[in-house]
């Protein structure tokens, strides 16, 4: 039997997985290491008193972190999505798909995404498309996975470096149309380059209520796309963008008006706690979870994430924080480098 030839788009999806793992930072130092909590010797709380749940668009999430958009679009990535969906089902974690644009263009690949519903029929699933797609594509993506919400990713640096990337970045008008008409909550997310206050203000102005600031520190799509180029011509852009911590600083003035989510460079439960402390309502993780499922398989990964959930509860107890709202008042110290960023960007540090 002759195996059907893999499409260029499917091959790219497999390349992304391979290169994301190849260039994985692992436990490398990032800006989360510039945040320290002040230890509380007498927290006057029991671990069982701590509520780690968070609210998203009127839905209660039992945990404040989720499996962020990763992959799909090939037979290899179908297996990964099936395994991640099993983990999501066991742990009751929300899960986002990778970009579904490839399956909109080639419907024969739809099952590489819809497999998530096969293994997690009752879970909270987020569909995913790139900015530049229209309302019709958005509705198809949501229908493909019977999704509860939609992620729209904005990724200009990745597109610039990608050999076959887009060159047209007039996105705001159609994002506004999708938000108003797609029928499910919409998260506009970066893909590891962070967001500025100006960007968040633009999104708020067109009605976006959920924003994932997704900063530098985790999976690096400039490095990945540059590796796919024959000329390797964009290596000097590898450090482009704001870190996740810096992006959370940028979001401070908007945190009472829009729901800020965070992703990028999350390595462990303490990083999740730190992102929540800086104002995130939930935290997405991609690279670390991709590594787990590839190296350990879904059963062990699920056990690890159940442990993460317990450890988040324990760390919050050490801080005397009964819920995320209380956690966001826990005293912290910032490194001189992070203080410098706040000063240079004229961000009000009162209350941080």
Image: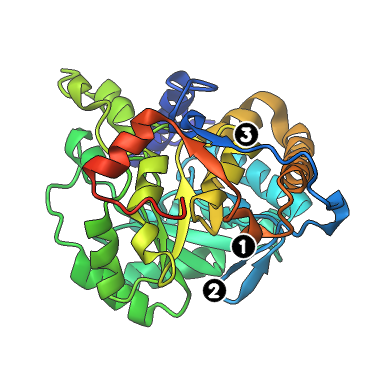
| 51 displayed left or right of 100 | right
Is residue 344 something one can see in this rendering? yes
Q: CA distance from mark 2 to mark 1?
A: 17 Å
Question: Is residue 196 placed above or below 341 in the rendered structure?
Answer: below
User: Foreground: 233 or 79?
Assistant: 233
Check disc 1: other Cα within 10 Å, few if <14, some if 14-19, many if 20+: some
The disc label shown at residue 325, or none:
1
User: Foreground: 84 or 246?
Assistant: 246
Q: Earlier in the sequence, mark 3 or mark 2?
A: 2
Helix, strand or loop at label 2? It is loop
Residue at 78% from the left image edge and 43% from the top image edge = 314
Quarter holding the N terminus is: top right
Check disc 2: other Cα within 10 Å, few if <14, some if 14-19, many if 20+: few
Q: CA distance from mark 1 to mark 3?
A: 20 Å
User: Foreground: 137 or 325?
Assistant: 325
Q: Earlier in the sequence, mark 1 or mark 3?
A: 3
Tell me residue 59's x, y (percent): 63, 73
Q: Earlier in the sequence, mark 2 or mark 1?
A: 2
Tell me residue 173's x, y (percent): 19, 72
Helix, strand or loop at label 1? It is helix
Q: Nearer the viewer, mark 1 or mark 3?
A: 1
The disc label shown at residue 57, or none:
2
Q: Which residue is mark 3?
A: 268
Helix, strand or loop at label 3? It is loop
């Amino acid at each position: 039997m002759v195996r059907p030839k893999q499409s260029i788009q499917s091959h790219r999806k497999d390349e992304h997985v391979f290169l994301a793992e190849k260039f994985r930072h692992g436990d490398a130092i990032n800006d989360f290491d510039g945040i320290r909590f002040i230890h509380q010797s007498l927290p006057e709380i029991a671990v069982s008193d701590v509520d780690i749940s968070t609210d998203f668009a009127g839905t209660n999430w039992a945990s404040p972190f989720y499996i962020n958009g990763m992959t799909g679009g090939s037979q290899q990535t179908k297996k990964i999505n099936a395994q991640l969906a099993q983990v999501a089902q066991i742990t009751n974690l929300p899960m986002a798909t990778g970009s579904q644009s490839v399956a909109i263009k080639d419907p024969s690949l739809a099952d590489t995404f819809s497999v998530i519903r096969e293994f997690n029929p009752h879970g909270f699933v987020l569909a995913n498309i790139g900015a530049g797609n229209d309302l019709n594509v958005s509705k198809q993506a949501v229908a493909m996975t019977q999704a509860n919400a939609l992620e729209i990713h904005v990724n200009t640096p990745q597109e610039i470096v990608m050999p076959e990337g887009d060159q047209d970045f007039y996105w705001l008008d159609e994002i506004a149309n999708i938000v108003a008409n797609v029928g499910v909550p919409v998260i506009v997310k970066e893909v590891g380059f962070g967001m500025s206050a100006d960007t968040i203000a633009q999104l708020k102005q067109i009605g976006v209520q959920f924003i994932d600031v997704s900063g530098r520190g985790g999976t690096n799509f400039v490095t990945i796309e540059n590796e796919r180029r024959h000329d390797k011509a964009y290596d000097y852009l590898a450090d482009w963008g704001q870190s996740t911590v810096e992006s959370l600083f940028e979001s401070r003035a908007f945190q009472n008006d829009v729901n800020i989510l965070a992703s990028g460079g999350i390595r462990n439960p303490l990083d999740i706690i730190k992102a929540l402390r800086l104002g995130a309502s939930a935290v997405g993780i991609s690279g670390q979870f991709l590594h787990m499922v590839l190296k350990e398989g879904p059963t062990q990964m699920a056990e690890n994430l159940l442990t993460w959930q317990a450890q988040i509860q324990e760390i919050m107890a050490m801080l005397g924080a009964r819920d995320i709202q209380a956690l966001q008042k826990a005293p912290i110290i910032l490194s001189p480098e992070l203080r410098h960023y706040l000063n240079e960007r004229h961000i009000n540090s009162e209350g941080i």
